Image (cartoon, rainbow, N blue to C red):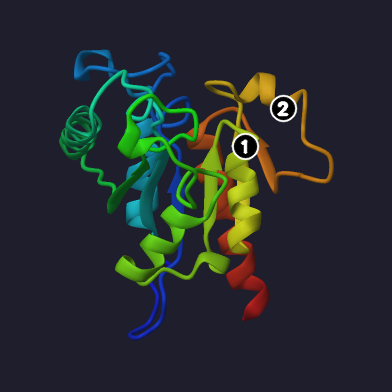
């Protein structure tokens, strides 16, 4: 199944959280050697690639503001993830992160911003740079803030039980529901592709 947009049309995307969703949650990830993809992550991203969906990472990295590591470390981690995915025939189209936190110790990053999830700034940047239709897109993550981000941009949100997800599932914020709750990223991708297939069938 290929779901590529026609010429001149905005693209669908799947916005994927990093820690606890694509890679194992290890706390503040301060060096490349601590990166561990989940066993299904390459297959999940490759399936989205083959379906013609944009894959975009959106991640909060307040460790920069807190002084635990630099932006260079974050970018090095993302290059390493890209290399691991490429070796498995998969790719992420863009990597976006928020280095800010209002309680940060590093002055230039100690601020409130619109890019820290559930703020929509990272998605808005992807819309500008990649021509994505957020209302036709999905957000997948292990926190309710990822689902809240999906609601903020008019898309659909999937909560995964990896990382903090199993705990998060037990305490949903009032008035917020995920479109789906799955065990992990590969199940989330299966749900997304099945949902889109049904959508296409119903429009024929």
How many labels sit on residues? 2
- At horizontal 47% and vertical 30% (from top left) the residue drawn is 21
> Between disc 2 and disc 1, whose residue precedes?
1
**Mark 2 touches mark 1? (CB < 8 Å):** yes
- The crowding category of the residue bearing disc 1, from other C-alpha atoms within 10 Å (few below 14, some 14 to 19, many at least 20), is many
- At horizontal 45% and vertical 65% (from top left) the residue drawn is 12
Indicate the quadrant where residue 110 lies.
top left
- At horizontal 33% and vertical 85% (from top left) the residue drawn is 7
Question: 87 or 69: which is nearer to us?
Answer: 69
Q: Position of residue 135 (x, y in %)?
A: 57, 67
Question: 141 or 96: which is nearer to us?
Answer: 96
SS type, badge 1? strand
Query: Farthest residue toward the bottom?
Result: 8
What residue is pinned by disc 1? 159
Q: Position of residue 97 (x, y in %)?
A: 35, 42
Camera sees residue 1: no
Quadrant where the image shows the N terminus: bottom left
Camera sees residue 167: yes
What residue is pinned by disc 2? 169
Q: CA distance from mark 2 to mark 1?
A: 8 Å
């Amino acid at each position: 199944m290929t779901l590529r947009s026609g010429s001149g049309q905005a693209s669908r995307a799947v916005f994927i959280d990093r820690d606890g969703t694509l890679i194992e949650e290890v706390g503040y990830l301060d060096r490349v050697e601590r990166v561990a993809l989940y066993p299904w992550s390459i297959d999940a991203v490759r399936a989205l690639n083959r379906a013609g969906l944009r894959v975009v990472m959106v991640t909060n990295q307040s460790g920069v503001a807190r002084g635990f590591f630099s932006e260079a470390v974050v970018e090095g981690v993302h290059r390493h993830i890209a290399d691991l995915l490429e070796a498995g025939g998969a790719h992420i189209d863009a990597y976006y992160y928020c280095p800010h936190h209002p309680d940060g110790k590093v002055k230039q990053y100690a601020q409130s911003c619109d890019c820290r999830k559930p703020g929509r700034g990272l998605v808005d940047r992807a819309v500008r740079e990649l021509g994505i239709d957020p209302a036709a897109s999905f957000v997948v993550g292990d926190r309710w803030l990822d689902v809240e981000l999906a609601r903020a941009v008019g898309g659909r949100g999937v909560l995964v039980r990896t990382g903090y997800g199993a705990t998060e599932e037990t305490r949903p914020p009032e008035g917020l529901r995920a479109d789906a709750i799955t065990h992990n990223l590969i199940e989330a991708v299966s749900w997304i592709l099945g949902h889109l297939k049904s959508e296409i069938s119903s429009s024929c």
